[in-house]
Amino acid sequence: MSFGARHLLQTTMPSIPSLPTIPTLPNPTLLPPLPAMPTLPKVAVPPMPAIPTTLPQPTLPTLPTTQPALPKTTVPPLPSLPTMPTTLPPMPSIPTSLPKIPSIPFLTPPPATSP
């Protein structure tokens, strides 16, 4: 660093402001004692009722061991289905020549006129 730059740095340093002084706190032994907490009056509490460890089990009704007989139902027979024929009917023949379509007058060219 050059001498001129160092001289500028040394002469232009801002002055640090002084910190305010912290006031001293009073000695904790000089504080007054805290007031005593008031106590609640003693009240006789009734004893808790005893809870049985096992609950009484209700008597369950006995289930019958035999199943009642269900009424017999009869299903009517299914109707007979028609059988498919073994041979198919002949296919209709398609004509090889198309019918003549009449000409539409406004779609045909006009007749040639001779002068």
Image: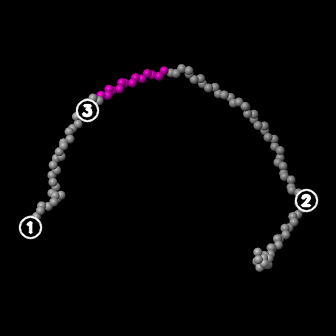
**Can residue 99 be seen in this snapshot?**
yes
Judging depth in this view, the residue of 81 and 103 nearest the camera is: 103
Task: Relative to 2, say whether 49 is above or below.
Answer: above
> The magenta stretch spans which residues?
69-83
Judging depth in this view, the residue of 11 and 65 nearest the camera is: 11
Q: Quadrant of the N terminus?
A: bottom right
Residue type at numbered disc 3:
Leu
Q: Is residue 74 left or right of residue 26?
A: left
Q: Earlier in the sequence, mark 3 or mark 1?
A: 3
Measured in 3D between alpha carbons, the distance from the residue under mark 3 to the one under mark 1, in whole angstroms, is 67 Å
Residue 9: image location, x then y, percent: 77, 76
Which mark is on residue 56?
none
Judging depth in this view, the residue of 79 and 90 nearest the camera is: 90
Q: Which mark's residue is nearer the viewer, 2 or 3?
A: 3
Residue type at numbered disc 1:
Pro
Residue 18: image location, x then y, percent: 82, 72
Give the residue at x 82% y 71%: 19
Mark 3, residues whose alpha carbon is within 10 Å: few (<14), some, or many (≥20)?
A: few
Residue denoted by label 1? 115
**Can residue 12 be seen in this snapshot?**
no
- The kind of secondary structure element at disc 2 is helix
Q: Main secondary structure of the magenta part?
A: loop
Residue denoted by label 3? 88
Mark 1, residues whose alpha carbon is within 10 Å: few (<14), some, or many (≥20)?
A: few
Task: Relative to 2, say whether 32 is above or below.
Answer: above
